[in-house]
Image (tube, rainbow, N blue to C red):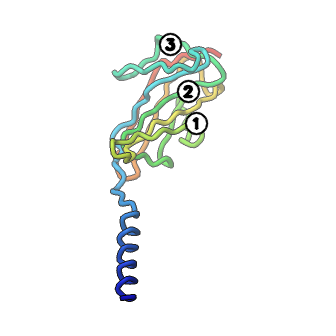
Amino acid sequence: MKKSVVFLLLVCMAVFLSSAVAMAGPAPALTKVDIHAFTAQSYNYQWQFTPANYPRSMHGYSFSGPELYMSVIYTGIPNWNLTFIKVNGTQYKHSQLFEKQFFITDSGGIVGGYEIVYKIPSTYLGAANTIIVTSRGTNGGSGDNVSTNIKFVK
C-alpha cells in the first residue's frame, strides 16, 4: 500500500512538472521594419505618424527640443546586434539610441514583434534629416525603412 501511494505521488509530480514547462516554437522571421511615428518637445511628445507611402516624408512637421523620439515597429523578431539606425548617413547601433521597448503579442500572449522607441539627441540632427532603419531577424528575414524631410529646429 505504501509503495503504491509513493508511486502515485511520483506520477502526479511528474505530470505536474512536465505541464509547467513552457514549450516555445522558433522565433518568427523578421518580415517588416516600419518607422511608425516621431515626436519631440515641440509637439508636447504627442506622436506624429509617418505617411504610409515611400519615402515617408515628414515635410509637414517641424520638430524641436532636446531630442527627437522615433517609434519603430518590427514584425518578427529582430537580432538587436544586427539592427542599425542611420541618421543623415551616420550609423548607430540599436543600443546607442534605444529608449523603450513594447512587446507585440498575439491573443495567446506569444511575442511576434516589438515597438521600439529610439531617442535621437538634437546634436545628431540637422535642419532636414533622413533616417534609415535596417535589421536582420534572429531566425531569418530582414527589413529596412526610410523616412525623409524630418525638419528639426535647434
Residue topped by disc 2: 69
Residue 52 image position (x, y, % from top left): 35, 22
Front residue (pair 127, 72): 72
Compared to residue 24, the image places residue 122 above or below, namely above
Task: Please tell me whether mark 2 sits on a helix, a strand or a loop.
Answer: strand
Amino acid under label 2?
Tyr
Q: CA distance from mark 3 to mark 2?
A: 14 Å
Q: Say whether disc 3 or disc 2 marks the residue closer to the N-terminus.
A: 3
Identified at 40% across, 42% down, the residue is: 113
Along the viewing direction, whichever of 114 and 118 lies nearer the viewer = 114
The residue singled out by tag 1 in the image is 99
Q: Callout 3: 10 Å neighbours few (<14), some, many (20+)?
A: some
The mark nearer the N terminus, 3 or 1, is: 3
- Contact, CB < 8 Å: mark 3 with mark 1? no
Distance in Å between CA atoms under marks 3 and 1: 22 Å
Task: Measuring from the top left, give residue 61's x and y in whole percent.
Answer: 50, 12
